[in-house]
Image: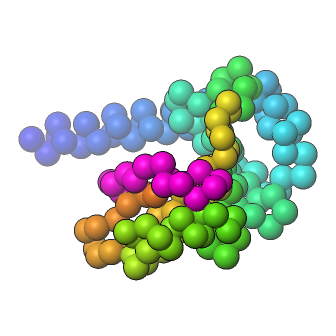
Amino acid sequence: MKFKLTLLLLTFTVCATQAQIRKVPSEVTDSFSDRYPHAQKVSWKDNITNFEAQFILNGYEMRADFNSKGEWQNSEKKIKFEELPAGVNDGFSKSKYSDWEKLSIAEIEKNGERLQYRIYVKKSAVEKKYLFFDANGKLLRDAIKI
């Protein structure tokens, strides 16, 4: 039984390692460089269905996804609560989650969609949610943190 478990773990490790070995296509890196010419500390992750770049831009931690053809899909910028647009700040303060602890904030830009803001909140060790607001402060949806 131990041998089978060891073999299974070894197989998963090799597969996971090989998933990270695939080279990022030049179409992806070129598209990234065109979109974010001043990005610093860039690192890449192969998510099988897309390539994810993590980087610093103008002092902000960012993440951007590109498909294998180099087409930009979306990006996230970590921001502080104080940097939210006034409407989003107001919308959050009027929501039923206003007394929950704010853990992280992100500005989300998706290809073909309007700008959104995600506020990750926690009420207790088990009650955590992602709140998605539009730029005017309308709560679009909440999602359970898994």
**Figure quadrant of residue 14:** top left
> For residue 124: magenta?
no
The quadrant in which the N terminus is found is top left
Question: Taking the image as drawn, is residue 44 in sight?
Answer: no
Q: In this view, does 43 lie to the left or right of 2?
A: right
Q: Position of residue 88 (x, y in %)?
A: 60, 63
> In terms of secondary structure, what is the magenta stretch mainly?
strand
Instruction: Check the image and name the residue furthest to the left.
Output: 1
**Figure quadrant of residue 118:** bottom right
Q: Is residue 61 left or right of residue 91?
A: right
Question: Taking the image as drawn, is residue 70 in sight?
Answer: yes
Q: Residue at x 25, y 36 (%)?
A: 8
The quadrant in which the C terminus is found is bottom left
Q: Where is residue 100 in the image (x, y as percent from the top left)?
A: 39, 76
Q: Residue at x 29, y 42 (%)?
A: 9
Q: Is residue 130 above or below residue 27?
A: below
Q: In this view, does 9 lie to the left or right of 102?
A: left
Q: Is residue 140 left or right of residue 7?
A: right
Q: How many labels does the image show?
A: 0
Colouring of the image:
rainbow
> For residue 144: magenta?
yes
- What is the magenta range? 132-146
**Figure quadrant of residue 122:** bottom left
Q: Where is residue 7 in the image (x, y as percent from the top left)?
A: 25, 37
Q: Residue at x 80, y 37 (%)?
A: 32
Q: Residue at x 72, y 26 (%)?
A: 71
- Residue placed most toward the observer, 101 or 34: 101
- Residue placed most toward the observer, 105 or 22: 105
Instruction: Check the image and name the residue furthest to the top.
Output: 69
Q: Position of residue 10 (x, y in %)?
A: 33, 40
- Residue placed most toward the observer, 43 or 106: 106
